[in-house]
């Protein structure tokens, strides 16, 4: 078998000779110009298709009202349910549901960061860290509970 020599390891004189013979071409500008032309053609085809066949538009979106049938994805349902729970505090003031709803989420994240400090047990085994384990299980169960409640409501 003949060992192939990579082009990049050839001396410059040899590269120039192969280009002159038409057995190879330079990466720049040859290949770069070719790829640029291909990109422009594809882009023009996409623009033409979007112009000739525009997407169907429904009614204009109203940023101040959320339709009743809209629900977030499952991983946002717990936060969505916390905001819905906070709506019950409207009697405090119009500001309360938003501030308290977002504040509850901040407290939950702060609680997760505080778990290592609430249980200063230096042990590494789970069985010996009962407080941290109980707090972690309560956090996971709370998230699951709020997610299911948000899904059902």
Image: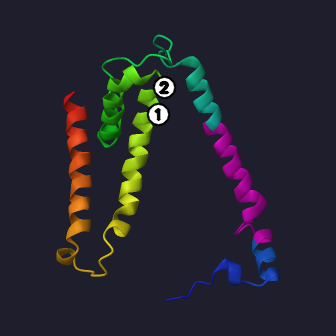
Name the element at disc 1: helix
Q: Taking 16 as reference, is 10 left or right?
A: left
Rendering coords of residue 78 (x, y %): 30, 40
Rendering coords of residue 96 (x, y %): 44, 28
Q: Tell me the CA gap for discs 2 and 1.
A: 6 Å
Magenta highlight range = 19-42
Rendering coords of residue 18 (x, y %): 75, 74
Residue at the spot of label 1: 99
Between 122 and 13, the residue placed more toward the observer is 122
Residue at the spot of label 2: 95
Contact? badges 2 and 1 (CB < 8 Å): yes
Rendering coords of residue 3 (x, y %): 56, 88
Q: Pointer 1: residues within 10 angstroms few (<14), some, or many (20+)?
A: few
Q: Residue at x 72, y 64 (%)?
A: 27
Q: Quadrant of residue 16?
A: bottom right
153 w.r.t. 104: above or below: above
116 w.r.t. 8: above or below: above
Q: Residue at x 25, y 40 (%)?
A: 147
Name the element at disc 2: loop
Q: Pointer 2: residues within 10 angstroms few (<14), some, or many (20+)?
A: few
Between 53 and 31, the residue placed more toward the observer is 53
Q: Taking 96 as reference, is 54 left or right?
A: right
| Res. 73 visible in picture | no
């Amino acid at each position: 078998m003949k060992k192939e020599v990579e082009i990049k390891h050839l001396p410059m004189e040899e590269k120039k000779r192969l280009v002159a013979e038409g057995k190879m071409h330079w990466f720049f500008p040859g290949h770069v110009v070719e790829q640029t032309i291909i990109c422009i053609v594809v882009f023009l085809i996409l623009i033409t298709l979007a112009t000739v066949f525009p997407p169907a538009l429904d009614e204009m979106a109203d940023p101040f009202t959320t339709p009743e049938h809209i629900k977030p994805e499952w991983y946002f349902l717990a936060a969505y349910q916390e905001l819905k729970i906070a709506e019950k505090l409207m009697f405090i003031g119009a500001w309360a549901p938003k501030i308290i709803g977002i504040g509850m989420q901040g407290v939950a994240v702060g609680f997760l960061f505080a778990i290592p400090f609430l249980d200063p047990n230096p042990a590494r085994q789970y069985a010996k860290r009962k407080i941290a384990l109980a707090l972690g299980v309560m956090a996971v169960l709370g998230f699951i509970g709020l997610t299911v409640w948000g899904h059902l409501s």
